[in-house]
Amino acid sequence: MKILFRRDQYQSLTAKTIFKLYAKIELENDERTILDKYDFDRAKLIAAVQPNLVRNAFIVCLAIASLVWMNLAWINTGLFLVGLTIAFAFTTFLYGIPFALMIGAFFGWLYYDRKRETIYVNEL
């Protein structure tokens, strides 16, 4: 049996260090028959299938965006007493919603980036 390893390291966009390890085994015929006999070919590292990951990241995005937008709207209601409501309401609608969506998209992407790198060992 020969075990071949290759490793890789790089930085993500969020300055998070990503490590990758690739492994490959080369088996001879008698080793292959033993693995097949005891059904060890199922023992491998697998990436977790997360069907709701994108949906959950989108929910995080919308929740954060709505919180940011509500805070911007709350700040503008305080300006109602000053009489600047129309000017600041326009800027909240025009600039506040895109700003809130950008902040929400960032946190949604951050959630997705942290949760997608799950690896499990398949049980025998």
Image (spheres, rainbow, N blue to C red):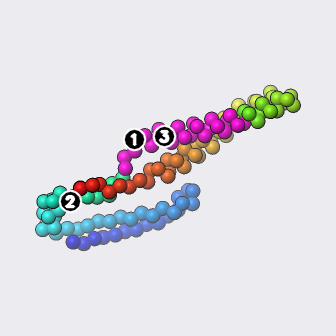
Give percent across and percent down for residue 92.
Answer: 73, 33
Amino acid type at circle 1 is Pro
**How many numbered marks appear?**
3
Amino acid type at circle 3 is Asn
Residue at x-position 48% and y-position 62% = 18
Give percent across and percent down for residue 7.
Answer: 40, 68
Which of the two discs, 2 and 1, labels the residue nearer the N terminus?
2
Regarding mark 2 in the picture, which secondary structure is present there?
A: helix
Is residue 12 among the parts visible in the rendering? yes
**For the residues bearing labels 2 and 1, Cβ distance under 8 angstroms:** no
Is residue 92 among the parts visible in the rendering? no
Eyeballing the image, is 61 above or below 119?
above
What is the CA distance from the residue labelled 2 to the residue labelled 1? Answer: 27 Å
82 with respect to 120 (left or right): right
Eyeballing the image, is 14 above or below 51?
below
Residue at x-position 48% and y-position 40% = 56
Which residue does the numbered mark 1 point to in the structure image?
51
Residue at x-position 58% and y-position 37% = 63
Q: Per the image, is 68 magenta?
A: yes
Relative to the observer, which residue lies in front, 105 or 72?
Answer: 72
Give percent across and percent down for residue 121.
Answer: 32, 57
Quadrant occupied by the N terminus: bottom left
Amino acid type at circle 2 is Phe
At label 2, counting other C-alpha atoms closer than 10 Å, the crowd grade (few under 14, some 14-19, many 20 or more) is: few
What is the CA distance from the residue labelled 1 to the residue labelled 3? Answer: 10 Å
Which residue does the numbered mark 2 point to in the structure image?
40
Which residue does the numbered mark 3 point to in the structure image?
56
